[in-house]
Image (cartoon, rainbow, N blue to C red):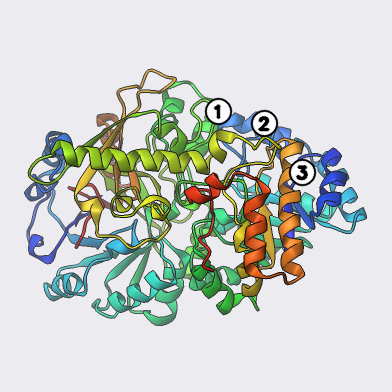
Amino acid sequence: MEVALHIREAAEARSSMKIGEASGWERSSKLGSWLEAVVRRFGDMPVDRFYLGTEFCENLLPSHEAVRSLAATRLPMTLLTPYVSNSGLRDLRELFQLLPSESEVVFADWGVLQVLRQDFPALVPVQGRLLNKSLRDPRVTGLYAIDGANNPTLDAMRGSNLDNASYANLLARFGVTRVEMDQLPQGNSYDLGSADLIAHVYAPFGFISTARSCLAAGLHYRGADKFQPGALCRHECQTNLLAYSYTNSPFENRDQQFWLKGNTYFYTHTDAMLDQLSAKMESGSVGRLVFQPRVPMVES
Amino acid sequence: MKILAPIRERDELEMLIASGADEFYCGVTPKEWLERYSGAVWLNRRSPKGSGLDNVQALRSLCDDVHAAGRELFVTLNGPYYTAEQIPLVLRLGQQLSEECGVDALIVSDINLMMRLSEARLHAKLHVSSVAATLNTEAVRFLLNFGPSRVILPRSLRLEEIAGICADVSKDVEIEVFLLNDGCAFEEGFCATTHHHSVGAFCTSLSDMQADFEWYGPRMSSRRERWLRANLDDYRKWIWYLNGNGCGSTAKGLPYGPCGLCALTDLQAMGVASLKVVGREASPFKKLASVKMAHDIVTRVRAKQDKLVVIERARSLRAEPEHCDAGYMCYYKVGA
C-alpha cells in the first residue's frame, strides 16, 4: 500500500519522509491535539507521494511557483483539482503544462477529465472523492450502521457506483484506474467493479458538502453582493475555522462537530472509522492512504 | 424557451397547462424499491413520500394525458449513484418508462446509468440532471459521449457563465436552467448529505446549531468576533431566502424562494431552451402560482418587451420589493 501526504509547498516534501513529521502543521488549536494523536497513529508510515492543491475551490488553486517547485523535487506528485467554471478550467490548463509526465491529476469534474484526455495524455487521471457520491452525512448515516437498519439499505449507503463492472470499464476507457473515496461514517464497501481499480482513501477528514458560494469570502462583501457563486475572494478561508456543534440533533449525538473552512464542510474521523480504515489497509483493500495533516483547504 | 413544470398527479395537469406549462417532469418510486431500500435511500432526488408517483401504472396514465395535451413528460432517475445491486432495477424501470409508458425523456445524474441507458437505445431521450454538476463547457462535451439531448445546468452558474456554455454547445444540446423556487446553499451535485425528514436539510439545520469561530491569527479580538458573527448572521439570512423565506408565500399566495424572472431576457438571448420550475413535492396551488408567474414574464420576453420593462414587471409580481432588494432571492444577478 502506498502513502501520500497532502502538503502546502515543496519545502515540506522530502524523500524518506514519514507522516509523523507532519505533526503540528494544522494551526487550529481546536483540532490540534486530536490531529496530533491521529498523526501519531499513522506516524511511522513512510511517505511515497505528495499531494498539492485543492479539491474544493477554484479560487484556491496552487500558484505556478508552488507547482514548479514541487515538480523540481522530482518526487512523485499528484495535483488535486476542484470542480471548475470555464475560467477555472483555463487556469488549470496552465498548471497542467507545468506538470512532469506521469504526474497524477485528481479530477472532481468531468470537464477536467475531458481536458486531460484531449490535451494532456501524459498525465494520469485519478477520479476524485467528490465524484464518489456515497452519502456521508455525519448527522445520521452513521446511525444506520448501529441502528439495525435492514441490510440492503445499509449496503446501498456503504456503496457507490464503483462496484459496477460497467462503470469500471467506462473509467478504464477514459484511462482511469485509480479512484478516491472518503472513509464513511456508516462504513464503506470496498467492492470495486474491477480488480484493476485501485482505491485511495483519505484520512482523517471527510468532506460533507461544498459550494460555489463561500461564507468566508462574504466577509469582504456588502449586503446583496455576499455569497455570490464563484465570487472573487482574498482567501479569507485561510484566516478562520468555524466549528459547528450539532446541538439541535434529534438523536443523542449533540456533541458531534462539523467544520467549515471557506466553502466546504468536513467531518473528522472517529476512532471507529480509523479502526475500520486500518483494518482495510491491512487486508489490502486500500491501495493508497492519502493523509491530510491540515483541514484540506490549503493555500499553496 | 419553454416552461418546464413539476407534476405529481393527473389532477394537476389541466390547470398547469392552462397556466402556461409547456412540458412536465415528475418522479416515480415503485413499491419494490421502497420495500427493499426503505425511505432512507432515494431512487431520485426527492423523498419517495409525497413528491412523486408510487407506481408505473399511474405514471403511464399521466403520460397518456400529457401526450393527449400535446406536451412532453420527463421522469427523474437522478439518484447521485446506483450500486451494482440497484442498477438492474433502475435499468428495468427506465426501460418500462420509455418503452411501455412512452415517457419522453429520463433525467439522469449517475454517469454509469447514463451510459447504460444510452447503450440500451431507448425511445426516451436523456436529460443530464443538475445533480451531475455540469459547470463548464468541457463537462458538457464529456457528457455528449452518452448522447443526451439536454443538459440541466446547476443553479450556481452565473449568467455570464451560462452564456459562455450556451455559446459553445447550445447547437449540440439543449440547455435548461432553473427559474423558480428551490435554492441550494451548496453545489447540489457535491453535497453528500440527506434531506431525510428525521434530520432535514443540512444547510438549514446549520442555522440552529451552535457555531464557534477560531481565528488563525495572533488573537481573536471582540471586534473581530463581531465581524465574523455579523457575516454568519448574513449567511443564515441568505439560507433563509434560499429556503423560500422559511417556506413562505406572499399575501396573494405567490411563492418566495430563488427566482430568475428578471434574467429571462438574457436567458432567451443566450439560447436557453427550457426553464425549470422546481417543486415536485409542492402543493398544487404553489405549482399553479409558480407557473403563472413564469408564464407572465416569459410571454413578455417572447413578445420582445424591453428588458427593463420586463424586470420591472417581474419585481412587481410579488409586490414585496424589499425581498428583491435584499438580493438573496435571485438565482442570477442581472445587469441592466
Element under disc 1 = loop
Q: Seen in the image, is A260 located left or right of residue B4?
A: left
The residue lying at 29 percent from left, 68 percent from top is A104
Q: Tell which of B11 and B197 is nearer to you.
A: B11
How far separated are the C-alphas under marks 1 and 2?
10 Å
Asked if the residues shown at circle 1 and circle 3 are in contact, with their CB atoms under 8 angstroms apart, the answer is no
Give amino acid for label 2. Lys
The residue lying at 17 percent from left, 58 percent from top is A7
Give amino acid for label 3. Leu
Report which residue position mark 2 lands on. Answer: B49
Percent of width and height locating residue B27: 71, 44
The residue lying at 68 percent from left, 49 percent from top is B317
Report which residue position mark 3 lands on. Answer: B288
Percent of width and height locating residue A221: 33, 54
Tell me which corner region of the image, top left, top right, bottom left or bottom right, holds residue B172.
bottom right
Q: How many residues crowd around disc 2 within 10 Å: few (fewer than 14), some, or many (20 or more)?
A: some
Asked if the residues shown at circle 1 and circle 2 are in contact, with their CB atoms under 8 angstroms apart, the answer is yes
Percent of width and height locating residue A11: 8, 64
Element under disc 2 = loop
How far separated are the C-alphas under marks 3 and 2?
21 Å
